[in-house]
């Protein structure tokens, strides 16, 4: 059983003369191929990919823990049950997972992102001093509008999927197989944008490297066939090209000083998808705690500046954007009331406003709305943040989603009446 093998290899790493593991790859079949196997069985073609992996790490200080077909939830279980029990924690963990959630299960961007995020946070929780490198979800076929199956057969391949001749712009099966954008490209792009934003806000604990373009033709209209023969898994040639992008990023992380949980998120105000705002106006001691919280919390967080008119949002974590569906430029600088709607109980709003005016903590259920108009039942906590003189300068909002059915019947009736 591969999971047992990985757990044993983790325990034995750096023990009894065995080399330590400096770099650990975690993932699915793409990662398992680095071992030369698929579903634990060795294949001649995969041996070439194993050779590429071994050549990339000649000191034998890297391991690949991947199981074909695994989703994010499978990987999370594995690392919670033995695969991270290293005596000497790896310096860098490379995570490449999520394509099976999208291609096999039909999961959306939000669920896939949250699954990858859960894996990353578990790695950071269990491996002190380790950094995580995210590759994002790699491109995959078939082309949008194709009648081909979403997943290539495994472990063998049909004649159609095994074809190597032709290019991504040829007509017929080759065009269907390799053409881009693919049927999953929209979700993949969304997931990767969220992963990039998550890495930016991690306080230097998580990095992201864009690996999509290296598998595509220059015009972006197709996957290069000899780099991904089945339009999903990198071939040996694909591995070589991939590692040319990955290894410099890995080497950069290996040479960095050990990370600190108190390191602050990147709060550059560039208006891009990675812009989370700024914590510069927050007291220094509180600021470092907020930086940690923004990384570790599974809930949507935002900070409002109480020293400015309208108390605008000055910082929000990745989960806030995921949960609400709004982009940073639609959130930052605005008062939180834009989340309210017809179903929001004004009595609840008044209680919240009174607490804010008095500088007190507030907790209660508030009905807010996503950008697309879907109601969200939030178990909302508002906590005042004070400066060194004890003055309230900001409020931290923590939005914990609750299912609508958890509301009292009277509240559900009121909500339905307002809709």
Image: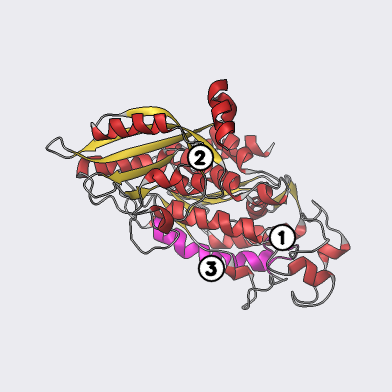
Position of the C terminus, as image quadrant, is top right
Which residue in the protein does label 1 denote?
183
Q: Residue 61, percent across and down?
A: 50, 52
* Closer to us: 54 or 130: 130
Q: Callout 3 environment at 10 Å: few (<14), some (14 to 19), or many (20+)?
A: few
* Closer to us: 56 or 69: 69
Could you say whether the residue bearing mark 2 is in a helix, strand or loop? loop
Could you say whether the residue bearing mark 3 is in a helix, strand or loop? helix
Q: Residue 129, percent across and down?
A: 37, 44
Which residue in the protein does label 3 denote?
244
* Closer to us: 160 or 405: 405
Please indicate whether residue 273 sits to the left or right of residue 175 in the image: left
Task: State the residue at coordinates (48%, 52%).
Answer: 326
Observer able to see residue 130: no
Q: Would residue 83 be counted in the magenta stretch?
A: no
Could you say whether the residue bearing mark 1 is in a helix, strand or loop? loop
Magenta part of the chain: 227-253
Q: How many marks?
A: 3
């Amino acid at each position: 059983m591969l999971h047992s093998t990985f757990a044993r290899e983790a325990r034995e790493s750096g023990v009894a003369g065995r080399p330590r593991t400096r770099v650990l790859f975690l993932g699915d079949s793409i990662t398992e191929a680095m071992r030369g196997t698929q579903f634990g069985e060795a294949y001649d073609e995969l041996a070439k990919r194993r050779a590429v992996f071994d050549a990339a790490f000649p000191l034998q200080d890297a391991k690949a823990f991947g199981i074909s077909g695994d989703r994010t939830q499978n990987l999370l279980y594995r690392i919670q049950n033995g695969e991270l029990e290293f005596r000497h924690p790896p310096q860098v963990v490379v995570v490449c997972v999520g394509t099976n959630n999208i291609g096999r299960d039909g999961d959306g961007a939000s669920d896939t992102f949250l699954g990858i995020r859960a894996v990353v946070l578990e790695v950071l929780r269990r491996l002190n001093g380790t950094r995580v490198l995210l590759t994002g979800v790699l491109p995959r076929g078939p082309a949008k509008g194709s009648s081909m199956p979403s997943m290539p057969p495994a472990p063998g391949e049909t004649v159609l999927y095994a074809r190597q001749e032709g290019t991504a712009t040829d007509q017929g099966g080759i065009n269907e197989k390799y053409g881009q954008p693919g049927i999953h490209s929209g979700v993949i792009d969304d997931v990767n944008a969220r992963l990039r934003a998550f890495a930016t806000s991690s306080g230097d604990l998580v990095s992201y490297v864009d690996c999509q373009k290296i598998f595509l033709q220059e015009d972006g209209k197709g996957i290069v066939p000899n780099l991904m023969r089945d339009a999903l898994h990198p071939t040996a040639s694909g591995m070589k090209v991939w590692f040319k992008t990955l290894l410099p990023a890995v080497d950069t992380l290996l040479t960095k000083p050990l990370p600190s949980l108190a390191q602050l998120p990147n709060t550059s105000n560039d208006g891009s998808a990675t812009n989370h705002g700024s914590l510069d106006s927050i007291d220094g001691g509180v600021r470092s705690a907020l930086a940690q919280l923004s990384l570790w919390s599974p809930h949507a967080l935002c900070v409002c500046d109480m020293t400015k008119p309208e108390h605008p949002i000055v910082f929000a974590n990745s989960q806030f954007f995921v949960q609400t569906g709004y982009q940073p430029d639609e959130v930052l600088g605005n008062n939180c009331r834009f989340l309210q709607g017809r179903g929001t109980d004004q009595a609840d709003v008044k209680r919240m406003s009174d607490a804010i005016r008095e500088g007190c903590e507030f907790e209660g259920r508030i009905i807010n709305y996503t950008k697309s108009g879907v109601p969200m039942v939030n178990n909302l906590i508002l906590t005042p943040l004070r400066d060194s003189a004890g003055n309230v300068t900001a409020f931290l909002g923590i939005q914990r989603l609750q299912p609508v059915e958890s509301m009292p019947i009277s509240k559900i009736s009121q909500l339905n009446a307002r809709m």
